[in-house]
Amino acid sequence: MKNSKRTNYQLIEETKEFVRNYFKNVEPGHDWWHTYRVWKNAKKIYNEEKKRNKDLDNPESRLIVELSALLHDIEDYKFSGNEKLSGKVAENFLKGKLNEKTIKKITKVIDNISFKGAAEKQKIMFPELAIVQDADRLDAIGAIGIARAFSYGGFKKRPLYDPNEKPRQNMTKKEYLKNKGTTINHFYEKLLLLKDRMNTKTGKEMARQRHKFLKQFLREFFKEWNSRT
């Protein structure tokens, strides 16, 4: 760090406060509490994965994981329309607080964390990104993932479901970013795909039950939709 008087703990607390203030009055699925859950998941995954990968067992990697998790959704492209703005805001916030190499790694996590369509391949991957990406994806599945999907769908005024509108499989990045389909279709276009796209052993283990709950929810949804209850 450039400022040796600022401890990692202090920087994390400062970052938490910055993010809390940044996310006042936003869509509930992408608010401070989403970031808080991703941060908690990231710490849990990190603590398990560092036992498997000794290269992760150091203060810098832990700091990169925690700060990336806390800053990952600042100016999310879904709201800002600018894919690089999130990393830029994070970089500006961290400037003078950390060395440039560490800041660059954090912004690389932020710039490469998002799902951008089933047809898009992950071009960049490294251990800290793998952890934070898994932590973020965990919050997109399970009970909370369902709540977040409908919150965002309502925010965008999208239909819950339309039986005449089929899910769009294997969308490119361009198609995915422009997609305005129903919330139920979003389950098939993204959420149900995430379990098999987890990077870490810990993330895969944590995703199993959440994925199972997604499927249970959909079975009940279609049962009720078709008046079979």
Image (spheres, rainbow, N blue to C red):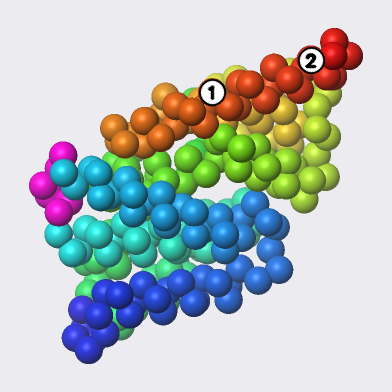
Callout 1, which amino acid? Lys
From what the image shows, is residue 66 above or below residue 7? above
Outermost residue to the left: 54
- Disc ID at residue 223: 2
Position of residue 80 measured from the top left corner of the image (x, y, whole percent): 62, 59
User: As drawn, is 187 to the left or to the right of 129?
Assistant: right
Position of residue 86 measured from the top left corner of the image (x, y, whole percent): 49, 62
Picture quarter containing residue 82? bottom right
The magenta stretch is: 52-57
Q: Secondary structure at mark 1?
A: helix
Q: Residues within 10 Å of mark 2 (few under 14, many from 20)?
A: few
Tell me which label, 1 or 2, sits earlier in the chain.
1
- Disc ID at residue 212: 1
Quarter occupied by the N terminus: bottom left
- 132 or 94: nearer the viewer: 132
Position of residue 27 measured from the top left corner of the image (x, y, whole percent): 70, 57
User: As drawn, is 74 to the left or to the right of 205?
Assistant: right
Residue found 41% across the figure and 35% down from its top:
206
Q: Does 29 lie within the magenta span?
A: no
Does residue 163 appear in the picture of this structure? no
Cβ atoms at labels 1 and 2 below 8 Å apart: no
User: As drawn, is 22 to the left or to the right of 125?
Assistant: right
Q: Secondary structure at mark 2?
A: helix
From what the image shows, is residue 227 above or below residue 155? above
Residue found 16% across the figure and 39% down from its top:
52
Outermost residue to the top: 228
Does residue 63 appear in the picture of this structure? yes
